[in-house]
Image (tube, rainbow, N blue to C red):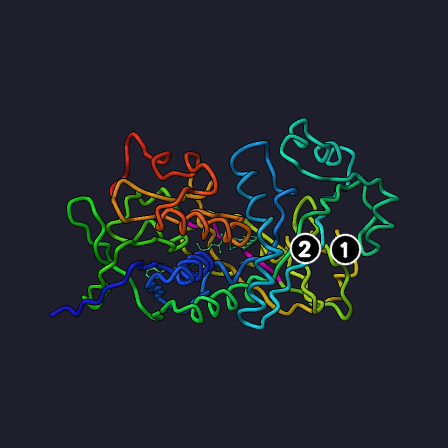
Amino acid sequence: MSRASCYDVVIIGGGVMGCSIAWRLAQEKQRVLVLERSVPGAEASSAAAGMLVPHAEAHGDNPMTRLMMKSAARFPKLSTELQNATGMDVEYRRSGALRVAFTARQGKELKRPSWASRAKVQQKSFSSAGLSKLESSLAKLHSGVLYPKDARIDPRLFLRSTHLAALRSGAEFRSGTYVECIEQRAKKAEAVRLEDGTRIMAGTVVVAAGSWSALVEGVPLQRQDVIPARGQVIELTSSSPLTDRVIFGPDCYAVPRDDGRILIGSTTEFVGHRRGVTARAARDLLTAAIALMPALGDARLTGSWSNFRPFAADGLPVLGKTGVDGLLLATGHYRTGILLAPITAEIIRCLILGKRSPVPLASFSSSRLARSSPLSK
Ligand SMILES: Cc1cc2nc3c(=O)[nH]c(=O)nc-3n(C[C@H](O)[C@H](O)[C@H](O)COP(=O)(O)OP(=O)(O)OC[C@H]3O[C@@H](n4cnc5c(N)ncnc54)[C@H](O)[C@@H]3O)c2cc1C
């Protein structure tokens, strides 16, 4: 016989989305349960580089740029709030980000686009000589653009701190708990079923299962709507910190940590959920990184990993209500899930409490993914 229990909100997945949403809802005195098949932060959220770079990553004056900007603006207050709630410094640093070019042709691509000021993208151009003054660790380059408002964070500390803040606010977490299915009655989500047959009743179910979101039975997505995009990362450690900034070269990025580690990323590969760091990717990332910062040639190789960004066909997140009452989605955050965690948590909190979303959600709705010839699950 199956055992049943009942929560206001059940969240599937304990990554940065699940933890952030749980925290915000627990603060509102909602009875929240997060179900995580492994442990919180086991997947993409701990693999991320930690760039918070909406200015450097903006691709137009559009809803995604506005979403990134709004979320980025929440980090200063959020990091203080986390520090007060948990005593942890999540290493949020307004370091700025730098895009650099080796050649005149690459330099042309860095030129300020016409929409930049409309989208409030702040940037400053540097010549070769200016760059050398700004960042002495860089190789001889053609030019670069500094995005002074961009930032970085340590995603593992961010995840741990958010998880702890959620626990302290009263959210419950069950690790090692695999959700097999979301049960519905009359187009309303009413429970989740675990693999051992346990049923847990829920007022609302939030799917925050990252690149596995479309695989949960009962989720109104086709399998191909959210798929894994594997990213590989190499961690180097230099005896003294080489830079404070996030740096984008043409073939890799470098993201420093306060303690001298520097993360080199990344690949984007559509190989299913196949884990692993390949020799080719490691070679290419190391070659690109040393070309960018020659002193990295003497750094120690201290880690490497891969994980899966949740990718929807148009690269945008999938947020909010679905055709099933009481079933919300918080997935598809692809390359910017750490950046977008605060705004996502706020959107889901507002929708569950019956308030207006802080941003228009049409561009991020799951209905945009509807296909004419859907594959069966
Ligand atoms: C190499 C790399 C670099 C990145 N760099 C950055 C960056 O610099 N900046 C940035 O903003 N973003 C970055 N990202 C993206 C970011 O990491 C992701 O968008 C974000 O972590 C997604 O969070 P999530 O909670 O949705 O998914 P995840 O962290 O993957 O969490 C989903 C959780 O759901 C659990 N789960 C899945 N299915 C079930 C089930 N059926 N039952 C129970 N639990 C389940 C999983 O075990 C997992 O813990 C990077 C990603 C990668 C891979």
Residue 128 lies, in percent from the top left, at 85, 42
Q: Which residue matches tag 2?
A: 254
Q: Which residue matches tag 1?
A: 293
Residues 336 and 229: in front is: 336
| 250 versus 182 height, above or below | above
Task: Give, as a single range, the part of the protein colored magenta.
Answer: 227-234
What's the CA distance linking mark 2 and mark 1? Answer: 9 Å
Please identify the quarter of the rendering in which residue 233 is found: bottom right
Predominant secondary structure, magenta span: strand
Q: Secondary structure at mark 2?
A: strand
In the rendered image, residue 190 lying in the magenta stretch gets the answer no
Please identify the quarter of the rendering in which residue 314 is found: top left
Residue shown at the point (47%, 42%) measured from the top left: 358
Q: Is residue 201 left or right of residue 210?
A: left
**Dot 1 alpha-carbon crowd within 10 angstroms: few under 14, some 14 to 19, many 20 or more:** many
What's under tag 2, amino acid-wise? Ala
Q: Is residue 220 left or right of residue 284?
A: left
Residue 181 lies, in percent from the top left, at 23, 56
- Looking at the image, the residue that sits furthest to the left is 1
What's under tag 1, amino acid-wise? Met
Residue 64 lies, in percent from the top left, at 52, 38
Residues 128 and 54: in front is: 54
Mark closer to the chain start, 2 or 1: 2
Q: Secondary structure at mark 1?
A: loop
